[in-house]
Amino acid sequence: MRVCRRAVLAVCDVEEAYARNFMEYLNQRKGIPFEIHAFTSAETLCAFAAERQIDILLVSERAMTEKVRQLSVGKRMMLSEGLSEIPGEISDLEETKEEDDCAKVFKYQPASQIIREVMDCYAAEQSALNPAARGKKEFRLSGVYSPSGCSWKILFDLALGGYLARSERVLYLNLDPLSGLEEAAESMGVRIPGRTVSDLVYFSRRKNGHLFYFLEGMVQTFGNLDYILPASFPEDLRDIGAEEWKTLFCSIRDHTDYSVLLADFGDCLESLPDLLKECSEIYLPVGSDRESGFRLAHFQKLLKRTGMREDEPWMHVIAPPSPDEVQEDLAFTVTQGAFYRLVREMEHERESSGKTIPVF
């Protein structure tokens, strides 16, 4: 039986602590589609390259030698320290000359940002292995939609995504134009600027087959849950039709190793019923007040008119936990507190019922 070779990412830096810490970060991060190797000298790197193919080589300016430059690798990127900007620091080898055609990434920035830049570059230029060939698991599209526009559904989303991500690879997309996701993350100490859902849609339109690597370079993480920052402007999503969303969801299914896509749908999306029909399961957060009940009833009528049954086993109406149970600390609320307990009890009840979830 032929075994699919895993792509190799090599890091070479004479700063031993940097190379070791960077490799440890990559090994701890879920979903990195590479076999990681770190080297602290050009000699050991070249010896490895003589035996193994290197798909991406990250090499510092101080470790770049003529032998390293001549290595046959898939993509070479320089960990730049800005030495080319300092008089007297350019070596005789002139590592930074333009004819090397070596992409640069600034060395002294968060490792997550380095990975985003590396993945962007690799996705754009490399004809790499398709990770979908590694044996695809069943995939489901879990939708969240609040007929009453619950303000607390963002907490439910994070609790549900985090609970599912304990044992599965989960990607969370919030398509609500006023989701509050980025602000909620900031309140919990997560502040990493990056690409948004709009960028993901734009990239998928190009259909160049490297979605996996592009996506890996733009995901943010909250615990074990991967998510993409929501669109910066509501207008970015209004012109995207149902078929284009379906195409994107299929691409994530076919070209990544996620087994669950958790999508929170907002009201501005075109053909919302068509998207909900595609879901393996739907969660409907609804307020406990009378008016919210009216909106839920209206939504259920809409489902009937579009040929959907509101009593399908994959549809869950979610009531909020008691306000007295919700803690001020949002991180605790969604990882251990009231919303986490709500999700855990709901999932335990479903598991004990023996109901199966349709795949997407």
Image (cartoon, helix red, strand yellow):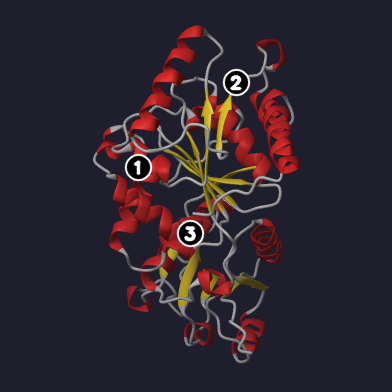
Instruction: Please rate how many residues cluster around mark 3, counting C-alpha atoms within 10 Å: few if below 14, some from 14 to 19, many from 20.
Output: many
Q: Quadrant of residue 186?
A: top right
Element at badge 2? Answer: loop
- Spatial distance from mark 1 to mark 2, Cα to Cα? 25 Å
The reply to whether residue 82 is visible in this rendering is no
Query: With respect to residue 338, does 221 lie above or below?
Result: below
Instruction: Please rate how many residues cluster around mark 2, counting C-alpha atoms within 10 Å: few if below 14, some from 14 to 19, many from 20.
Output: few
The answer to whether 136 appears left or right of 275 in the picture is right
Q: Residue 298: x and y, percent?
A: 39, 20
The answer to whether 91 appears left or right of 21 in the picture is left
Q: Are marks 2 and 3 in contact (CB under 8 Å)?
A: no
N-term mark: 2 or 3: 3
Q: Amino acid at mark 3?
A: Arg
The residue under label 1 is 274
The residue under label 3 is 253
Element at badge 3? Answer: helix
Q: Are marks 1 and 2 in contact (CB under 8 Å)?
A: no
Query: With respect to residue 100, does 219 lie above or below?
Result: above
Query: With respect to residue 342, does 71 lie above or below?
Result: below
N-term mark: 1 or 2: 1
Query: With respect to residue 300, does 116 lie above or below?
Result: below
The residue under label 2 is 319
How many numbered callouts?
3
Q: Residue at x 44, y 29 (%)?
A: 179
